Every structure is written in structure tokens, then in C-alpha cells.
Image: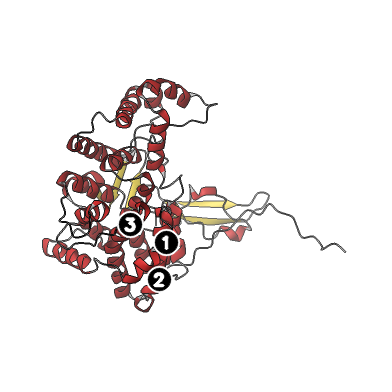
């Protein structure tokens, strides 16, 4: 707690209350408003843009400076020197693993590298072509029934077991959603492949066929998972925390996060990028769409540019851009028509005075959408892959909350309806 204190007084009243200021290690300090109801009022903050709903030591974002830290480590360094599973360990445990700890963690994840036979039976109930996010949300929620007997949220060992299961099984479920969506047979997971190699083989391989995964594409997939691993108190993470605060089953909590992520304003941005590129259609139309994007009266918006949190640049975008260039070169797709449109839009956004002044730089969704299209992933799967990477962030925040004293979430409201009235007659 800092020495600063704020005094709040009700208009027309001589009474006041003292609100302490709590110090943060980075970023803004926060005013403890727990005593505000003593004034007869609540605070009003639609969208919670000015409210710290929890205390967390996992991820820090400074949107003005373009900073993203996981347990203190810059995202750029993790993307360069670490990998997804090591970053998972970091988010869960707070520190990077030693070589032996990393090996043991990877072995533990591989030990859960399977799904029960009932999953295929459950999946068969969906029609071919059902949206992969609908299937994933349902499959994860159904795990609540499968693992009900070994899920005591008050038991730390049970929570860790849940974490390991989810990290291991999410890419399997995601790949099964893709295969069912496209009407192809499932491919079993392999313990001989890395996490990202295994995912790509389950996505694009065939049963009883030896895997042939490009190292460049496997690295790109790993980077996509890593860059989406956590992003502080976003809508889906806050949903998981709120669900978890009731003591709900963790698989149900993660399913609630998947449902929140499905919204186009949250996890659907990279799919919207591809839809925008298809709408533009040809490089010769770019100038027309740029003018439309600058016109306040036009509903058209350039997707994948700018970010609600990052007012300077998205630190993940630079890493994703490098990965994007490597993937396009590996696949010989530098001249793909839609990707040529994307590269031209990127150039305009970085050079045009209008976009530079408004800091509408390409963000992580812009490049990740391009990478996944190049790899051959259908747009309907983009948010599923986002969810696969983000699961470790969701479950880390859930575990952090349950590892400390917490209260059930209960936001208040500003009521604007009728006052009390009598039933007629």
C-alpha cells in the first residue's frame, strides 16, 4: 500500500471516506474502492475499462509502450529463445524450468496425449460442417463429466492434474474438430512428435501414414500458440475467472472462456482479416478500400490493424511478421493474390500518414491469419487454434485465483428501470 489516499465525499454532505491506494509492481496503482458503498453509491464503469477486478502476478501489459511480459519476461524474448511448452510451465509455475524440469514437464504432457473413446462418440453427434468452435466448446464442457471424480478445485494436486490434461488434450480436440468439419478420418496423436508437430500431423496427416512435418511450419505453429498463450484480463480470461469464482468445474470454466473467445470482437479478428482480404479481392481495388477506411461515414474497417490495448504497436506483431515471411518463403506463396493484398496493406499502414498518426499498425491477428491461410487452415479453425494456445493462460489465471483467498464475482449495476409499481386491478 502506498502513502497516497483519496477522500471521497457525497455531494451536499460533510461526510467522507478515505480510499487507500494500493501499489503495483508495474503499471498503474489502484484505488481500493471497497468502502465506496458506505456513501450509498457504487462506481460505474461499463466494460470495466478502469477497474482492476483481481490481483495477478502472471502477465503485464503496457499498451502505451507496446510491452507484454509473462512473469516478467518480454514476449519477444520468449518467442525467440523459448517454446510453447516451456512458456506454459512459466505461466503455471512462475519461473522458467531447469532442463530436467522441462524434460519432466514435457513427459507429463505426453502422458496425457490421448482422449477417451467417448470423445469420438460425442463428436459423431455433430453434423459434418458444424462450426469447429461449437464442437470445441461442447467437447471441453463434456470433460466435466469425464473427469468429475478427479476434480476437486480445493485440492492443489487435482488442479495441476487438470492443467496438464487440458494442455495435452486441447490440440487433439482441436484437430478432431477440423477433421470432423472437413469429413476426414481422425489422426491419432504421436509421442514421437513435438507438441506443434503433433498438432499439424493430426490436422493434415492421414491414419497409418508416417508424419512429414516441415520444421518451418512446426516452428510457426509453436509461435502462434506461444504468442496467444496469455493476454492479461481480456474478456475470455475474465469470463473464466468469474466462472471459477463460483467453484465451478474447471472444464466448464474453460468452456465458458471458449464461448467468450468465439465472439468476433475478441477471438474472431484473424478470421475477419481473411474475409476483408477476400472482399478487396484484387490489388487494383486497394486504393478504393483505403479511402473507404478513412471515411468516417463508411462502415468498412480495415481488420487486423490497431488494438484496443496497444496504443503504440503490438509487440507480438513483429514476431508474427518474421514468422509469416518464413512461412510464405517455405511454401513458395509470395505471389498468392490474397497474400499480395495483405503485404500491400501492411506497407500502406506502416507508411501512410493517416494510419501512422492514428497508430493503426498491423497487429498479431493480421499476420496470424495470413500464416494459417498459407498453411492451409480453414478460417473456421482460426479461433479454435487461438483457444488452444490461450488455454494455458485461462487455466493459469483460474489456478492463481483458487490458490489464494477469493470472493465470488458479483458486479453491481446502475438501475434505470421502473420504480416500484402496483399490479393493475
Assess disc 1: are there few (<14), some (14-19) or many (≥20) residues with their C-alpha within 10 Å of its C-alpha: many
Marks 2 and 1 in Cβ contact (< 8 Å): yes
Q: Locate residue 302: give its quadrant.
A: top left
Mark number for residue 174?
3
The alpha-carbon separation of the residues under discs 3 and 2 comes to 17 Å
Mark 3 or mark 2: name the one nearer the start of the chain: 2
Mark 2 or mark 1: name the one nearer the start of the chain: 2
- Residue 125: x and y in percent read 43, 64
**Side of 11 where 133 appears, left or right:** left
Q: Residue at x 41, y 28 (%)?
A: 280
Quadrant (top left/top right/bottom left/bottom right) for the C terminus = bottom right
The residue labelled by disc 2 is 144
**In front of the other: 260 or 394:** 260
Q: Is residue 140 visible?
A: no
**In front of the other: 193 or 150:** 193
Extreme-right residue of the structure = 425
- Residue 86: x and y in percent read 20, 57
The alpha-carbon separation of the residues under discs 2 and 1 comes to 10 Å
Q: Is residue 78 visible?
A: yes
* Secondary structure of residue under mark 1: helix
**In front of the other: 35 or 150:** 150
The residue labelled by disc 1 is 255
**In front of the other: 114 or 24:** 114
Amino acid at each position: 500500500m502506498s502513502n497516497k489516499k483519496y477522500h471521497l465525499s457525497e455531494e451536499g454532505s460533510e461526510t467522507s471516506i478515505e480510499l487507500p491506494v494500493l501499489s503495483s509492481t508495474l503499471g498503474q496503482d489502484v484505488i481500493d474502492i471497497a468502502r465506496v458503498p458506505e456513501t450509498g453509491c457504487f462506481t460505474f464503469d461499463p466494460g470495466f475499462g478502469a477497474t482492476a477486478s483481481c490481483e495477478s502476478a502472471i502477465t503485464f501489459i503496457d499498451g502505451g509502450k507496446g510491452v507484454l511480459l509473462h512473469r516478467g519476461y518480454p514476449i519477444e524474448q520468449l518467442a525467440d529463445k523459448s517454446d510453447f511448452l516451456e512458456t506454459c510451465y512459466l505461466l503455471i509455475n512462475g519461473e522458467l524450468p531447469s532442463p530436467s524440469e522441462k524434460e519432466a514437464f514435457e513427459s507429463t504432457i505426453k502422458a496425457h496425449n490421448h482422449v477417451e473413446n467417448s470423445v469420438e462418440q460425442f463428436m459423431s453427434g455433430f453434423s459434418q460442417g458444424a462450426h469447429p468452435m461449437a464442437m470445441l466448446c461442447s467437447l471441453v464442457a463434456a470433460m466435466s463429466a469425464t473427469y468429475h471424480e478427479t476434480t476437486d478445485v480445493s485440492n492443489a494436486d487435482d488442479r495441476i492434474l487438470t492443467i496438464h490434461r487440458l494442455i495435452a488434450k486441447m490440440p487433439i480436440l482441436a484437430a478432431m474438430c477440423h477433421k470432423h468439419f472437413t469429413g476426414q478420418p481422425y489422426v491419432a496423436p504421436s509421442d514421437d512428435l513435438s507438441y506443434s508437430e503433433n498438432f499439424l500431423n493430426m490436422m493434415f496427416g492421414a491414419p497409418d501414414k508416417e508424419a512429414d512435418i516441415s520444421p518451418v511450419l512446426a516452428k510457426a505453429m509453436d509461435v502462434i500458440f506461444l504468442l496467444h498463450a496469455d493476454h492479461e484480463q481480456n474478456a475470455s480470461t475474465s469470463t473464466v475467472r468469474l466462472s471459477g469464482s463460483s467453484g465451478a468445474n474447471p472444464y466448464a470454466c474453460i468452456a465458458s472462456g471458449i464461448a467468450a473467445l468465439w465472439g468476433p470482437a475478441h477471438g474472431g479478428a484473424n478470421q475477419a482479416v481473411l474475409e476483408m482480404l477476400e472482399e478487396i479481392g484484387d490489388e487494383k481495388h486497394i486504393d478504393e478500400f483505403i479511402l473507404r477506411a478513412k471515411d468516417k461515414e463508411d462502415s468498412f474497417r480495415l481488420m487486423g490493424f490497431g488494438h484496443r490495448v496497444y496504443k503504440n504497436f503490438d509487440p507480438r506483431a513483429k514476431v508474427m511478421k518474421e514468422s509469416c515471411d518464413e512461412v510464405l518463403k517455405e511454401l513458395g506463396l509470395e505471389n498468392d493474390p490474397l497474400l499480395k493484398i495483405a503485404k500491400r496493406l501492411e506497407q500502406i499502414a506502416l507508411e501512410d500518414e493517416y494510419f501512422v498518426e492514428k497508430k493503426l499498425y498491423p497487429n498479431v491477428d493480421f499476420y496470424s491469419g495470413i500464416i494459417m491461410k498459407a498453411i492451409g487452415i480453414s478460417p473456421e479453425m482460426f479461433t479454435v487454434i487461438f483457444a488452444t494456445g490461450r488455454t494455458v493462460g485461462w487455466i493459469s489465471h483460474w489456478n492463481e485465483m483458487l490458490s489464494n483467498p477469493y470472493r465470488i464475482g458479483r458486479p453491481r449495476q446502475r438501475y434505470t428501470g421502473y420504480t416500484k409499481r402496483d399490479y393493475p386491478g
